Every structure is written in C-alpha cells, then in structure tokens.
Amino acid sequence: MSLPANGCSHGLMGQSPLIAAIRRSIEKASRNRLPVLLLGESGTGKEVVARAIYESNPRGQFVPIDCGSLVGTLMESELFGHTKGSFSGATENKKGLVELADGGTAFFDEIGDLPLELQVKLLRLIQEREFRPVGALSWRKVDLRIIAATHRDLKAEVARGRFRQDLYYRLNVMTIRLPALRDRKEDIPLLIGHFIDQGRAQGLPEFCCGDDVMRALMSYDWPGNVRELKHCIDRMAALRSEGTLNMWDLPSALQQPHQSPVPHDLSDVLEQHAFHEFVLPPKSPVISLPDSEKQAICNALAQTGGERGKAAILLQIGRTTLYRKMKQYGIA
Ligand SMILES: Nc1ncnc2c1ncn2[C@@H]1O[C@H](COP(=O)(O)OP(=O)(O)OP(=O)(O)O)[C@@H](O)[C@H]1O
Ligand SMILES: [Mg+2]
C-alpha cells in the first residue's frame, strides 16, 4: 500500500513514523484472515484502522458490532440470530450479525464490554468457526474475519475476572496499538487541513489557522485524541465565518495561560464587556451547547466592538433573538 502525497490512505491521515508503522501493520493484516486486536485510547482511530484492514483486501461485508449495546434478553439473538418460535415474539427465522458477516469481516467494537455469557460463544466462533442461532439444534459453519477493538486494558480486565483469558489469548494474535495524538503531534497540521477540507465539502466556511492558533492546537494534549480535534475544527468552522482564525475563536480549554496569550486588544474588549469568564480555561475540555452559544455571542460582540446589530448579522440570528440570549446568559 503506497502512501499518497496528502498522507492519507483508507481515510487514515498522518505522516509520523508511528502512523507509518500502523500502515505497515494494516498491510500485513490485510494479507491473512487471522483475528486482529486494536488497542488504544478513545478517539485514536481504531475504527478507521479496522475499516482500512478490510478495504485493503475487501471480501464480503464489513459488519460493525457494538458490543456495548449487546445487553438484555435479545443480545444473543442479535449476534447469532434465532429460529421461528424460539421465544415469544420470534415469529420468523432471523439472521444475526455474525451470519451477515459470513464471507466478510465482523468488527467487534468495544470488545471489553461484551457480556461474559457471549464471550464463551465468541470463543467457540473463533476456535471452531461455528455458531448456533437461538432455538436451533445444530451448529452452523461460518467463514469470517474477526477484528476486535477496545479502549480498555484487556489484561487488567482478565485479572479482574471481567474478560475470559482464553478469549483474550485467541484475540491477541495480531495486536495493533493506536498511538495517542499527543505522541504524534507532528500529524496535527495535516489532520487539521483534512478536517477543514471535509467541512468545506459539507458547506462549512473554509478557514486557516494563524501562527498563534496553530501553536495552541499543537501544545494542547488532546485527551480525546483525533475525535476531539475533529470536533474542535468542526465547531470552529460552524461558529466562524471565513478567513484566518484568531485565538479567541478557539474553545476556552485551548486558551491556556502557558500557551500563546490572548491578544491585548481582545483582553481589553473582554474586560470592557465583562466577558473574561469565557476565556478562562475550564476544568474539562468538553463544552456544553449553552456555553458554546455564550462564547459565540461573546466572540461576535468582541469582533464588532460591542455593536449588537452587527453581531446579530455575524451570528445569522435576529436582533431580538440576540437580546433574548444575552439576557438569558447574563451578558451585559
Ligand atoms: N488517522 C486519522 N485520520 C483521519 N481521521 C481520523 C484518524 N483517526 C481518527 N480519525 C477520525 O476521528 C474520529 C474517531 O475515530 P475512531 O472512531 O476510529 O476512533 P476510536 O479509536 O474507534 O474511538 P472509540 O474508542 O471512542 O470508539 C472519527 O471521526 C475518525 O474519522
Ligand atoms: Mg470506535
């Protein structure tokens, strides 16, 4: 698999040595049908890699299975299907997700959340390549590739008795560890460009980042990894009109005092309008919708020097709505 000039293959962006190693692993994995275990923090791209492995050598369907949602009485039937009359409500024979993936790839996402009673059935599926629908008397053969992913420490889950050791060994044949974004910060500019392009394709305004903004984006640790970076870029594109991005367009979590300071002139405007509370770094990088609305209003007012009419135009809302929201949020 050769890497195109934009550093992207199968949706996996990045030119860092760590991502180059992931690409080599994807290539190796695509040459066989052994189970693959994808480990890594949330938002590091485990699903992107699972799809890349499948797409590098596509056979049959790619069937994502969200193990966390397999709960309750119907979970076994969802996974393995059922026969007509096997329980009340089973009015027809129904195929499960495993049968859908026959000939293709089943992606067991968040495998660490798979209930213990299904873990033993998955083990049989991997070892014997067979399963039994709920209510069926015989086992059915199936040929599928299994890719599993989790953000949990599976070894620790085994030690706690929450994950079967035999299943862990069966899955842990080819393991790919996705690096955290903070360990490959050199990929951040490429990812930003990619997400801006994606936003533009969806009709969002195109923008670019000034030096201080890029510095702030590079020095932040991104605990939510690539997903958090993507949300940050999407949110800035949605709240901002075209042009070069300034520090005050950033979510407040990124406006850390040890990073590039907020420009003096903005601080003055904020002081004047008592908006400073919105640029103090909050404890969590997650910003609620009301908070981001507040911040958008403050940004608009800061840009228009407090002129509400112009701010309403920038925000693409009516003046009355702006006044109501300013009152609601206590903006003077
Ligand atoms: N290398 C990458 N290039 C481009 N986009 C990426 C990359 N890594 C992740 N993304 C994007 O980031 C988001 C999160 O990726 P993904 O869903 O694969 O993460 P994950 O590891 O499965 O997270 P979780 O553990 O929370 O399920 C998606 O929108 C995905 O498209
Ligand atoms: Mg995922």
Image (cartoon, helix red, strand yellow):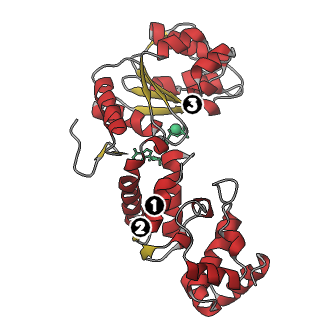
- Examine the image and state in which quarter residue 269 appears: bottom right
- Examine the image and state in which quarter residue 290 appears: bottom right
Taking the image as shown, residue 63 lies to the left or right of residue 318, namely left
Q: Would you name the residue on which mark 2 appears?
A: 211
Which kind of residue does numbered mark 3 sit on?
Glu
Label 2's element? helix
Question: Can residue 271 be seen?
Answer: yes
Taking the image as shown, residue 314 lies to the left or right of residue 196, namely right
Label 3 environment density (alpha carbons within 10 Å; few <14, some 14–19, many ≥20) = some
Residue 177 location (% of width, % of height): 45, 29
Label 1's element? helix
Residue 65 location (% of width, % of height): 53, 31
Distance from mark 3 CB to nearest ligand 1 atom below 8 Å: yes
Label 3's element? loop
At a point 50% along the width and 60% down the height, the residue shown is 216
Q: Would you name the residue on which mark 3 appears?
A: 110
Q: Would you name the residue on which mark 1 appears?
A: 215
Q: Are marks 2 and 1 in contact (CB under 8 Å)?
A: yes
318 and 179: which is toward the camera: 179
At a point 41% along the width and 71% down the height, the residue shown is 207
Q: Give me the C-alpha separation between circle 3 and circle 2.
A: 38 Å
